[in-house]
Image (tube, rainbow, N blue to C red):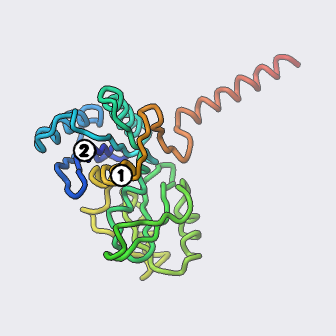
């Protein structure tokens, strides 16, 4: 099976093609162009590099969040468009799962962190497996949006070393190191970001397990409301308050 993976949840835009045991092509870029400008050219570049026609794809996997609201919409819209056009499954892969998969062989706790703005991070906690464990991860709990203090308080209950990675480390890494000391370990910069190949591989595993969701089933994982939703709810509350005051 051949799966196309799309990663647009952060400022890194990535595309990869994987089959059952190889990465056939992978491209990623971070620059001034928007994901909407970069994504489809990268898809065509990856297909061309691998010498694969779109019709040979068995599925499209897409990073579903949490992450940048705009980036997620672009990735999901592209994946759905390809899924509808090719009549192929579209597999929504949680971004934090794909990020943690970068370091699946770490034998202890893994905590991917993405900058959620507003002094918060998106995070989840996983337990990795040794190299003989079959490239597996076990997530411990849900996906969170919280401030660093609340996250570290939650992690302190485990009383063991934690491996951190993700684009939030430049901002929050020093505070983590100060709070956790020798228990905090950090992935080097080159391995901190979500990879489209990881998204594709996790999607391929779902296909192999018999899961074939249609394009309409792919949904983003937001964890918290977008800024537009927050403002819309605030405006709605203001309108209701004005209506109630006027009816008295």
Instruction: Tell me which label, 2 or 1, sits earlier in the chain.
Output: 2
How many discs appear? 2
Q: Quadrant of residue 78?
A: top left
Quick check: 18 above or below 214?
Answer: below
Q: Residue furthest right?
A: 248
State the image coordinates of residue 5 (x, y, percent, origin top left).
Answer: 29, 45
Disc 1 target residue: 208
Up/down of 209 relative to 165, above or below: above
Residue 58's place in the image compared with 170, above or below, is above
Query: Is residue 30 shown above or below 143?
Result: above
Front residue of 48/3: it is 3
Considering every residue shown, the one lying at the far front of the view is 210
Q: Which one is nearer the viewer's eye here, 138 or 232?
A: 138
- How far across and how far down the image is residue 103, in percent? 33, 67
Q: Tell me the tag on residue 68.
A: none
Residue 75 point in image, percent of width and height: 35, 37
> In the image, is 104 to the left or to the right of 16?
right
Please tell me whether mark 2 or mark 1 is closer to you in this view: 1
**Residue 212 figure quarter:** top left
Classed neighbour count for the residue bearing mark 1: other residues with Cα under 10 Å, few (<14), some (14–19), many (≥20): few
Q: Percent from the top left, x then y, of residue 180?
A: 48, 77
How crowded pointer 2 is (Cα within 10 Å; few <14, some 14-19, many 20+) is rated as many
Marks 2 and 1, Cα distance to the nearest angstrom? 20 Å
Name the residue that disc number 2 marks: 15
- Residue at x-position 58% and y-position 70%: 153
Q: Left or right? Give the position of 45 relative to 248.
A: left
**Location of residue 57 (image quadrant):** top left
Residue at the (64%, 31%) spot, across then down: 233
Q: Say whether residue 122 is left or right of residue 242.
A: left
Give the secondary structure at mark 2. strand
At mark 1, the secondary structure is: helix
């Amino acid at each position: 099976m051949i799966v196309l993976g799309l990663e647009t949840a952060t400022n890194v835009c990535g595309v990869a093609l994987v089959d059952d045991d190889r990465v056939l092509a992978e491209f990623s870029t971070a620059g001034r162009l928007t994901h909407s400008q970069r994504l489809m050219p990268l898809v065509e570049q990856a297909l061309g590099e691998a010498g694969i026609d779109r019709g040979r794809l068995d599925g499209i996997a897409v990073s579903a969040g949490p992450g940048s609201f705009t980036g997620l919409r672009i990735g999901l819209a592209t994946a759905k468009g390809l899924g509808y056009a090719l009549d192929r499954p579209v597999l929504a892969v949680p971004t934090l799962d794909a990020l943690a998969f970068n370091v699946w062989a770490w034998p202890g706790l893994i905590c991917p962190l993405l900058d959620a703005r507003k002094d918060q991070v998106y995070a989840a906690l996983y337990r990795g497996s040794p190299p003989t464990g079959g490239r597996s991860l076990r997530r411990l709990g849900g996906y969170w949006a919280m401030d660093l203090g609340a996250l570290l308080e939650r992690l302190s209950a485990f009383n063991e070393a934690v491996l951190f990675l993700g684009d939030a480390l430049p901002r929050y890494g020093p505070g983590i190191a100060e709070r956790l000391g020798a228990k905090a370990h950090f992935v080097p910069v080159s391995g901190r970001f979500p990879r489209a190949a990881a998204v594709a591989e996790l999607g391929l595993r779902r296909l192999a397990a018999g899961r074939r969701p249609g394009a309409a089933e792919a949904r983003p994982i937001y964890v918290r409301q977008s800024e537009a939703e927050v403002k819309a709810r605030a405006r709605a509350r203001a309108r209701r308050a004005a209506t109630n005051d006027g009816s008295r």
